[in-house]
């Protein structure tokens, strides 16, 4: 029997478990048309909105509007698009189910709100795979703060040494480093990782996951 290198496997959500880039891009363009006279931020930049707290991004993009107002507008418009503009990544369900069957403790730590995280997973038929979801509203401080990851580790009675965090951007690497856990960054999204970014692992497909989780 293969020896497990890790016991707890935690995932970022947007850009890692689910492809929400089409939804985020469509939502932002709706808001630009309504509240910025149609002046749109290029999609190449919008792709990097995935990761940091969306409230911070919206304040930067719409500094002339009340922060809570534009956040609620984003929430309203984006929710309409979940079923049509969010997609799973290739091989995600089969691999995640296999990892669950092999006894890995799977969780999500995200800057997305908890109820929206659950809804997004339901939209791509991944409900029930992750034992815990730590959303932005489940912590006092969002990623890259360590609170969410440590909360998930504590839920599983795990240790940082036996935990890995899997994400898709520098914020996720910072989250892992701040939490004292190893990190794997994925390459299947449109975000290009700077050369100086050096996670312990880089993976190109869900099919590569088992190769980094066992000795």
Image (tube, rainbow, N blue to C red):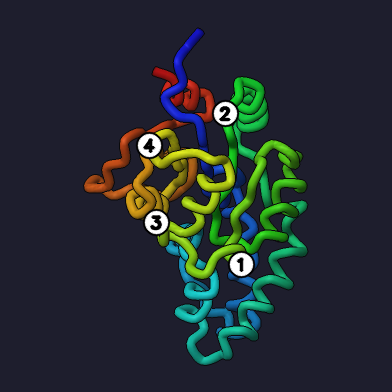
* Dot label at residue 161: 4
The residue wearing badge 2 is 104
Q: Is residue 76 above or below residue 188?
A: below
Q: Is residue 130 left or right of residue 198?
A: right
Which residue is drawn at the image coordinates 59% and 37% (left, top)?
106
Disc 2 + disc 3, Cβ < 8 Å: no
Tell me the element at label 3. Answer: helix
Q: Residues within 10 Å of mark 3 (few under 14, many from 20)?
A: some
| Residue ID for mark 1 | 137
Q: Can you identify the residue that label 3 sits on? A: 171
Q: Secondary structure at mark 1?
A: helix
Mark 4 or 2, nearer chain start? 2
Q: Going from the N terminus, do you reach mark 3 or mark 1 first?
A: 1
Q: Are marks 4 and 1 in contact (CB under 8 Å)?
A: no
The answer to which of 211 and 133 lies nearer the viewer is: 133
User: Above or below — where is 94 with respect to 130?
Assistant: above
Residue 44 seen in render = no
């Amino acid at each position: 029997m293969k020896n497990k290198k890790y016991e707890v496997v935690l995932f970022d959500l947007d850009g890692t478990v689910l492809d929400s880039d089409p939804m985020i891009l469509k939502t932002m363009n709706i808001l630009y048309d309504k509240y910025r006279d149609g002046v749109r931020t290029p999609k190449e930049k919008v792709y990097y909105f995935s990761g940091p707290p969306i409230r911070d991004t919206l304040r930067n993009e719409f500094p002339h509007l009340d922060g809570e107002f534009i956040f609620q507008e984003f929430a309203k418009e984006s929710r309409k698009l979940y079923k049509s503009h969010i997609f799973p990544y290739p091989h995600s369900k089969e691999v995640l189910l296999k990892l669950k069957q092999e006894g890995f403790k799977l969780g999500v730590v995200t800057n997305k709100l908890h109820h929206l995280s659950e809804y997004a997973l339901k939209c791509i038929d991944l409900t029930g795979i992750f034992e815990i979801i730590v959303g932005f509203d489940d912590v006092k401080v969002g990623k890259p703060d360590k609170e969410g990851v440590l909360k998930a580790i504590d839920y599983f009675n795990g240790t940082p040494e036996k935990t890995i965090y899997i994400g898709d951007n520098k914020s996720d690497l910072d989250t892992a480093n701040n939490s004292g856990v190893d990190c794997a960054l994925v390459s299947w999204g449109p975000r290009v990782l700077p050369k100086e970014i050096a996670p312990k692992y880089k993976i190109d497909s869900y099919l590569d996951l088992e190769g980094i989780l066992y000795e």
